[in-house]
Each structure stands twice: as structure tokens, then as C-alpha cells.
Image (cartoon, helix red, strand yellow):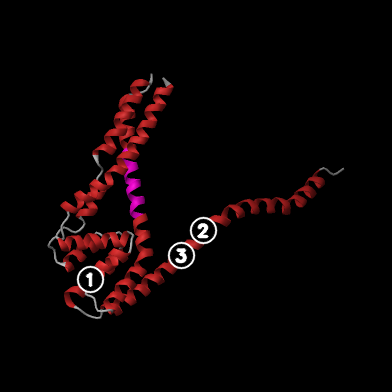
Amino acid sequence: MRLLAAGLAGFSVMATVGALRSRTLGERLTAHLEASPEEPGSDQDHRDRTPPGVVATPAVVGILIGAATPGVDSLTLGLLGAGAGVIGHKIAGASRRRTRSRAMRQELPVIADAIALRVLSGESVAGALDAVVETTQGVTSEELDDALADHRGGAGLAEALHAAARKASDPEGARLFDLLGHAHRSGGRLAEALGQLAADYRAALSRDLTAEGGKRALATYAPILGLMVPVALVFLMYPTLAGLSALSEGP
């Protein structure tokens, strides 16, 4: 009976992970079909929804485990499984968004410089974006490619870029997309603006690296100090305590 319960629990974990992974492609396609430039944030709202399978699978497995284990309430285990599925989905979504945001911040200086070079060589905004997307990989290229796909589907390039800015994985990426959209619509010194933007991105990356280095140094030295300080206090206080003990045991 215990082996059966353990097997069902393992199946629950595997099914939940599989549901989270298999959802990615479907959610991107559905978000692309449902979201529109006139509905800011609709794609983010769709991604934040919990799919039924993520709740139902652990709930059913919890009920089965409860039914197979004497003295355990199946309904309680089912509710706990459903709650665990929701929490796991939220945690996985937040982790995925943080990963994409961090990757985009690291890519933006190179992408901005690459677009600036293309614009300086005489290419249009659309041509520069096409060339950069074809020669680069990553989160930023993926989101630019989605904007270009919307443009090829009939939307204006400026509108597609502004829509991409509303759905960008990082606010700094939204700055780049908005700048490209405004430049395509009204013109201006795009290469110069992109160069300044790339410099801002590198300065922000430098600050992030400095802050991350400080956090890691604190995480490294805090346990060492936590062990050294009590040991040092013991060594410093031991002679005093020994002397007081000797005085208290006097003749």
C-alpha cells in the first residue's frame, strides 16, 4: 500500500511538471491570437491564468492517494493537491518571467548597437530589424520577430512595436521597442538615440553586476562570520571565566 501511494505521488509530480512544460507552446499561440494592440496587457493576463490541467491533475492524484491510504481523507488530499498545483504554476511562471527579464537585459546593449549600425548603413527600421533578428538569438530577438510577424500580417510596424513594448519581458526592452516605433513613424536621429540607449543599458548592467557581487559576497562571508564570532568570543572570555571560577573555589 505504501508503494502504491509513493507511486501515485511520483506520478502526480511528473504529471504536474509535464503539464507546466507542455503548456508553453499552446499559451503562446493562444496569446498571439487573442491579444491585440488595442488591449494592453491582455497577453500578460492570459499567461497569468492557471490552466485547468495544472489544478485537476494533482487534485485527482491526491484523491487517489487518499483512497489508497487507510485513515486519510481523500477530499483533503485532493484540495491540497489542487492548491499545490496552483502554487507550483505561479512559482514556475514567476521564475520564467524573471529568467526572460534577466536574459533580455543582458541582450539589449548588443541588440541596440546592431540596429544602430544597420541604420547608419542606410537601412530602414524594418530592414534593420529583419537583419538583426536573422543573425541573433535570444528573448529580445524572439519578441522582435513576433512584432515583425504582426507587421507582415497586416499591422503597421509602429503599432506592432508599441504592442510588443506593452508585452515586453523587461521594461528596458519596452523602451527599445517604443523608440523604434516612434522612429519608424516620425523619423529622427535613430542611430544616435540607439547608441545612447545602449550606453544606458551597459551602465544598468554594471550596476546590476555590482549589486549582485555585493549580495554574493554577503552570502559567502555571513556563514563564516557567524561561526568565527562565537568561537572568538569563547576564546576571549574563557580566561576570565576560568579566573572567576578559580576565585569562587577559593579556600
Which secondary structure, mark 2? helix
| Residue 119: x %, y % from top left | 26, 76
Badge 2 amino acid: Arg
User: Do the residues under discs 1 and 3 have CB atoms within 8 angstroms?
Assistant: no
Amino acid at dot 1 = Gly
Rendering quarter of residue 42: bottom left
In this picture, is 16 found above or below 102? above
1 and 2 marks in contact (CB < 8 Å) = no
Query: Residue 127, which numbered label?
Result: 1
What residue is disc 2 on? 216
Separation (CA) of disc 3 from disc 2 = 10 Å
> Is 66 on the left-hand or right-hand side of 27?
right
Residue appearing at x 26%, y 47% in the figure: 25
- The kind of residue tagged 3 is Leu
- Foreground disc of the pair 1, 3: 1
**Residue 225, percent from left and from top:** 61, 55
The residue stretch that appears in magenta = 85-98
Q: Quadrant of residue 191?
A: bottom left
205 falls in the magenta region? no
The quadrant the N terminus occupies is: top left
Chief SS of the magenta region: helix
Instruction: Provide residue 50's location: percent of width, then percent of height.
Output: 26, 43
Say which residue appears at 51% left-offset and 58% top-offset.
Answer: 216
Residue 122 vs 81, above or below: the answer is below
As helix, strand or loop, the secondary structure at mark 1 comes to helix
